[in-house]
Image (cartoon, rainbow, N blue to C red):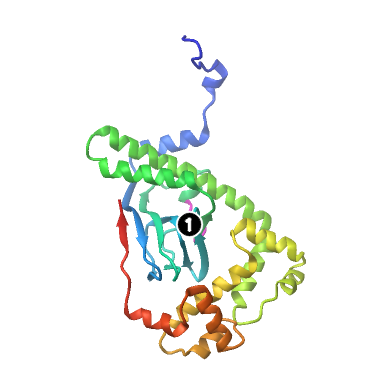
Amino acid sequence: MHPGQFRPDRKEKQRVNPVEKELTELLADERYGTFIQTIRKIRFPANYRFDSHAHPQVEINYINSGCCMMEVEERIVPLKRGSCIVVNPGQKHLFMVDVSKSCAITQLIYRTALPEKIPESLTCFHYDRPFYVFQDCGELCSLLENIGRYYQRRQEDDYQEAQLDFSLLQLYAMLSRSMEKERLQADSRQGKLGEALDRIHSRLEEDINIEELSRELGMSSRYLRKAFEDSIGISCSQYITMLRIARAKELLWDWEKDITQVASLTGFNSPQYFCRIFKKHTGMTPAQYRNMKKERPELTEET
């Protein structure tokens, strides 16, 4: 053996990584197959909107730049650069880009054929939640880019196709690990932050006071604010405002509701205050935003 060459001892050779074993067995199973519908980089112009829809594939969106928002099964999810959302099959969702600037994402949409029994460790195949959100996941973005390259070259030779297959296994391992980590974090905070989120979503029409909400939940306002920063990436007040603006955009898309109604339904105490906050966050008045519905901007794919 050459100097510096690694040689595992007998005990290490005998050890089998259970996740590795399950993934390789899955790859060898004739019932398994992954069918990629889309793998691409897209730049959406400011104010782009993709209306509510659902499909039988998994959809992964990594945010390369800018800010956007997705609504999944009536839960609004703010997304910023470095974050990623995984939307599971059959979940109704829509996509909106910030009004003030464009947004670029790396997107993978795929469907997987699977054997009847899936190991518990492969969380990414259990689809027990509508969606997952991860923060600061640049490693995932790099893997998606590799999958895109190998997918484009898959017909060149068997080596490229093998690299695509193994990269997909890496993706499943990475997603499952991130989902398990998110589950553990969610379980530890579910009684507090989860209830806070539910109350906020159900009270958007009301005046939401952070101090009062904290007392209702039996926690300090400092704890609640930190939970928002750690889990969602923005402050509690920013999250509430973002929810209200997102809901206002939805209502403004409905021509039957006037500005006063929209202000009332989104928790603003007057139409004037609503218009001022809406313009501050979007760069335009509610009426100007509504008129933009007539001119749908186009997206562009990046190479």
Q: Is residue 21 visible?
A: yes
* Residue 11 placement, left or right of 56: right
The residue nearer to you, when weighing 57 against 230, is 230
* Residue 178 placement, left or right of 166: right
Question: Percent from the top left, x then y, of residue 198?
Answer: 62, 70
Q: Is residue 42 above or below residue 295?
A: above
Residue shown at 52% from the left, 59% from the top = 129
Residue 250 among those drawn in magenta: no
Number of numbered tags placed on the structure image: 1
* Residue 155 placement, left or right of 247: left
Residue shown at 48% from the left, 52% from the top = 126
Question: Percent from the top left, x then y, of residue 44?
Answer: 37, 63
Looking at the rendering, which quadrant does residue 98 occupy?
bottom left
Looking at the rendering, which quadrant does residue 233 occupy?
bottom right
Q: Is residue 32 visible?
A: no
Q: Which residues are magenta?
A: 126-130
Local crowd size for mark 1, using a 10 Å CA cut-off: few (<14), some (14–19), many (≥20): many
* Residue 69 placement, left or right of 230: left
The residue labelled by disc 1 is 85
Q: Is residue 160 above or below residue 208?
A: above
Residue shown at 37% from the left, 45% from the top = 145
Three-letter amino acid code at disc 1?
Ile
Q: Is residue 275 above or below residue 52?
A: below
The residue nearer to you, when weighing 53 against 204, is 204
What kind of element bears circle 1? strand
The secondary structure that dominates the magenta segment is loop
The residue nearer to you, when weighing 214 against 130, is 214
Residue shown at 40% from the left, 71% from the top = 47
Question: Percent from the top left, x then y, of residue 153?
Answer: 26, 41
Question: Percent from the top left, x then y, of residue 62?
Answer: 44, 54
